[in-house]
Amino acid sequence: MKRKSRPTSLNSTQTAKTRRDFNADRSISELQQRVARLENAIADFVGPGFLDATGLASTARKKPGPKSIHDVALISERDRLIQMLESYWPELEPLCWPRPDERSLQNLLSRIARNERQSNGRHAHAADHLRENLAGVAKFLSSDRFRRDPRQIANAFAGSGAMGVWRSLKRCQAHPSNEPIGQRAVRAYICRKHARLFARLAADFSLPNFANSLRAYRGKDPNLRALTAHYLYMCWGKCNPDTAIFR
């Protein structure tokens, strides 16, 4: 039988020649080029937005106008304003009605802020907040509906800088404050909400009268029901305008 010759590809001399012609650097370069072409093709197919997700926020169109404020921050600012307003309400209330006195309010809020800083108090920020929005405060106080209620003033101006007065008022009213009525604002609160009880208390400033009046008064106001006669009697005297609170 005639033997078949081996294929040229299996010839030992050809194999050695092929091995001698192999260039590792050239192969690596070609592989790198292929990888680069594949990456470019994938990028063109998917788009740069998928490859760089961090760029989505920067390319999104921003809405004009002031930034929104979260309910937690809004309510926190509102409660700070309530605490300041009720701590100085005997001095502030006469300047709020029957017509707001913008110049006197400016001077009083400046004194409050200065007094709080000197005594390491916590109401300086709230006083500055209202003073910086004084034109809006004076306009808001021109309404008979809210001018004598420090809590509604706080509701209206808690969101100043981020929203309008009426929007701030509406959002804050949806979350009534849990702050107890300030000691220096108790008398004004009773006068505003419970005129009949106020008349009885004002007629006789004595602890027995306060006890009897509270016991006889029928009302479902939780702020009023939380007051004891002794506590109300103590607060009543603190509600007089007193310049001694300023250093």
Image (cartoon, rainbow, N blue to C red):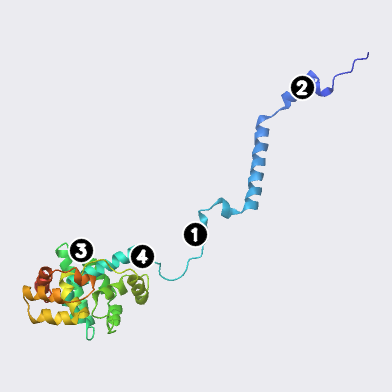
Please tell me in which quadrant of the rendered image residue 1 appears.
Answer: top right
Of labels 2 and 4, earlier in sequence is 2
Quarter placement of the C terminus: bottom left
* Residue occupying the point 22% across, 81% down: 96
In the image, 10: left or right of 30? right
Q: Are there few (<14), some (14-19), or many (20+) residues within 10 Å of tag 3?
A: some
Alpha carbons under labels 2 and 1: distance apart: 59 Å
Q: Nearer the viewer, mark 2 or mark 4?
A: 4
Of labels 3 and 4, earlier in sequence is 4
Q: Nearer the viewer, mark 2 or mark 3?
A: 3
- Kindly identify which numbered label has been placed on residue 71: 4
Alpha carbons under labels 2 and 4: distance apart: 79 Å
Q: Which is nearer the eye, 121 or 85? A: 85
Please tell me in which quadrant of the rendered image residue 80 appears.
Answer: bottom left
Q: Nearer the viewer, mark 2 or mark 1?
A: 1
Give the secondary structure at mark 3. Answer: loop
Q: Residue 160 in the image: state x and y as whole percent.
A: 33, 72
In the image, 191: left or right of 129? left
Alpha carbons under labels 3 and 1: distance apart: 39 Å
Q: Amino acid at mark 2?
A: Thr
Residues under numbered marks 3 and 4 in contact, where contact means CB atoms less than 8 Å apart:
no
Give the secondary structure at mark 2. Answer: helix
Residues under numbered marks 2 and 1 in contact, where contact means CB atoms less than 8 Å apart:
no
Q: Amino acid at mark 1?
A: Ser
Q: Nearer the viewer, mark 3 or mark 1?
A: 3
Residues under numbered marks 2 and 4 in contact, where contact means CB atoms less than 8 Å apart:
no
- Kindly identify which numbered label has been placed on residue 122: 3
* Residue occupying the point 83% across, 23% down: 8
Which residue matches tag 1?
58
Q: Amino acid at mark 3?
A: Arg
Give the secondary structure at mark 4. Answer: helix
